[in-house]
Image: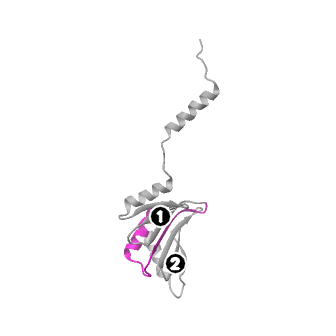
Amino acid sequence: MNPPHLPASIAVALLTITMLSVSPARADRCDDLAAQLARNISSLKVGKTAANAIALTHPATTSMRLGCASRNVTNEIFASTESKKPSPAFYDVVASAAALVFTIPKKDTLNGTTRCIKRIGLLRGYDIKTRYRRLDIHCTRTKAGTSVAISRERDS
């Protein structure tokens, strides 16, 4: 005797249930990246997620966030400080975060960030955009302080 055949709708339902139960629940890739930053950078805390960005806090920064991937950029690290001349701890936090996010050596991200901030002044202006090791670095100085945004375009 031939074994009984299941109707097609029941077979599809069983296949769907099997596929859903096999795949583990997975957090968002950006949340994973924020958790990795918190594990690898001391005193860094992960805050709330809003508008495709995750708030981060660190004593060396006034504000900090991790921008999640969009159509134009892979990710973005933004940090600001109240001082016009950032402390070495600020440079270290920004360079460490950028190195982890973009998987390049910390030395390269530190050099790029330092170079961008040092260019700010009367001759070149207070809004500097530069590229270093395929990273887009945007530095701004205002009366309130200094900010740095590091990102990488999708086509790079």
Q: Which residues make up the magenta segment?
A: 71-100
Vertical placement of residue 88 versus 14, above or below: below
- Report the residue at 48% width, 47% height from top: 26
Tags 1 and 2 in contact by the CB under 8 Å rule?
no
What residue does disc 2 label? Answer: 140
Kind of residue indicated by mark 1 = Ala
Vertical placement of residue 152 versus 14, above or below: below
Residue with the most extreme left position:
42
Foreground mark, 1 or 2, reads 1
- Please identify the quarter of the rendering in which residue 95 is found: bottom left
Q: Position of residue 70 (x, y in %)?
A: 58, 60
Mark 1 lies on a secondary structure that is strand
Q: Position of residue 107 (x, y in %)?
A: 41, 69
Q: Determine if the magenta segment contains residue 72.
A: yes
- Please identify the quarter of the rendering in which residue 87 is found: bottom left
Vertical placement of residue 40 versus 140, above or below: above
What residue does disc 1 label? Answer: 55
